[in-house]
Amino acid sequence: MAGTELTPQLQRANEEIKKYAREYGLDFFEVIFEMIDYKQINEFASLGGFPTRYPHWRFGMEYDRLTKSYQYGLHKIYEMVINNDPCYAYLLRANNMVDQKLVMAHVYAHCDFFKCNMYFEGTNRKMMDEMANHATRIRNYMDRFGVTPVEDFIDACLSIENLIDYHHSKVERLYKPVDQEIDEDDIDTEREPLKVPKLKSKNYMDKFINPESFIKQQLNKLLKQKEKSKKFPPEDEKDVLLFLQEYAPLKNWQKDVLSIVREESYYFSPQGQTKIMNEGWASYWHSKIMTQKALMDSEVVDFADHHSGTVHMRPGTLNPYKLGLELFKDIEERWDKGMFGKDWDECDDFRVKKNWDKKLGLGRQKMFEVRKLHSDVTFIDTFLTQEFAERFKLFVFEANKKTGQWEIASREFKKIKEKLLFQLTNFGQPFISVYDANFKNRSELLLAHRHEGYDLKISEAHRTLESIFKVWKRTVNLKTIVQGEGRLLTYDGKEHTETAFDK
């Protein structure tokens, strides 16, 4: 590690805050704090929080951006923590004591979330070592095959690193092709006709129970099922990277590089799926530990200033720290007072609801349950209420096409919730899956876009097809819907084409 150990004063503060965190019920792996300067913390941040990553230009570009932003006073990184066992966390050497204590409390809550939230269960708890192994393997490939070929291939892989199945991070569904002794296309359908299922009936009632239209409908279903049975993969494959890793004509080193990108993408995906919850949980507990246990009288003003800066939400923006913190506080209050269930939902008397308090005291228990079971999508869907949206003045805003100004488009709770959930589902990215790896019987790859009411950005779709072509090495197609019409986007390695396609 590049950092230094804690000073005796910080070590005492660390032990004190760790004790408070455990007393509140937080459960975490061992936490190792390292003291680093602002150059090191910017370097680690550019590498995703890790001290060692494989060499690539995008990490250098991110470091340059962070360094300039820090020098211009646009940002300051107070802490970083890695989901690992043990957890590694970094403290900025220039911070004062109240900041260091706040960060420690914040880190212990993050570590509790990493250990206990179900979406992190499948993550590699030795990722610090694994990242170093990845770096060594890729550097070896660069030494053997050249920096440019390896880096160009990494570019292609990183541009499609989000094409994984975020909801099945521990499942590897591989469809192994099965050799068939008989080609179904060679079967004489006159000798072996398709048997259309009919509804049971007596002979004289058959034409009424099984009319010709019904028979045609059943026959069409059978034909579609027969056609689908010849498709590979038989079911749409959401994990595009895994499919490419298994079936694209890649060299061994390319398969390994693609597997590294895929593994790291799955490692970071739970952090994206729980950003609001994770930061809200950590903010709740650093506030609780500091204000009730760890703060000295002389530190109150500094803490209030820095905490307010962390959770401040400017108009027109969404601060995950603020939203997560307030939702957890709202859950605690509602379950303490019994503001849930059938009686609460059916009560339409504003005055009764305003003074509602059954004194159940279940808030803290409910919070820990939520922390364990939910992601941001289910967290928002389950616990964001109309009362909460009204209290914090949430609304939907959109750009006015005539004036170019951003304006409030709706204050309706349903639209607010739908908009927020849409942004969080799949990180607001389109759902793309492998539909057919032998499209047109020419080994072309056909991808399918699950249309959710918003058309793809064609320019970005083109760049994605270009990147996948570099891996698949044959024509790549994408079926989607553009302005209500089915379209097939195709890239053959030279040019893009767009044709009509049955949606």
Image (tube, rainbow, N blue to C red):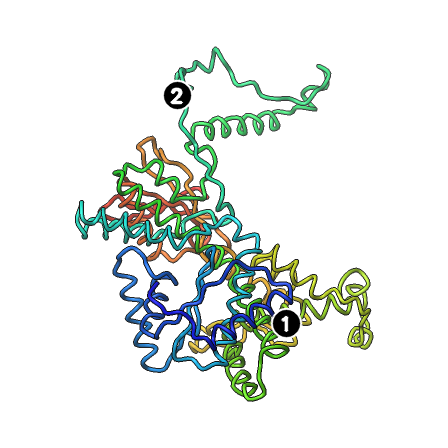
Residue at 59%, 70% in the rendered image: 285
Rendering coords of residue 44 (x, y %) = 35, 65
Task: Indicate left or right for 377 with 353 as reference.
Answer: left
Q: Quadrant of the N terminus?
A: bottom left
Q: Amino acid at mark 1?
A: Ala
> For the residues marked 2 and 1, what is the alpha-carbon distance in whole angstroms?
58 Å
Residue at 31%, 54% in the rendered image: 463
Which residue occupies the foreground of this view, 231 or 358? 358
Which residue occupies the foreground of this view, 228 or 252? 252
Task: Indicate left or right for 126 with 476 as reference.
Answer: right
Which residue occupies the foreground of this view, 486 or 20? 20
Task: Indicate left or right for 44 with 205 as reference.
Answer: left
Which is more N-terminal, label 1 or label 2?
2
Which residue matches tag 1? Answer: 389
Rendering coords of residue 115 (x, y %) = 54, 56
Residue 359 lies in quadrant = bottom right
Q: Residue furthest front?
A: 8
Q: Is 452 above or below relative to 476?
A: below
Which residue matches tag 2? Answer: 179
Quick one: SS at disc 2?
loop
Quick one: SS at disc 1?
helix
Q: Is 2 above or below relative to 54?
A: below
Q: Amino acid at mark 2?
A: Asp
Rendering coords of residue 415 (x, y %) = 59, 65
Which residue occupies the foreground of this view, 1 or 263? 1
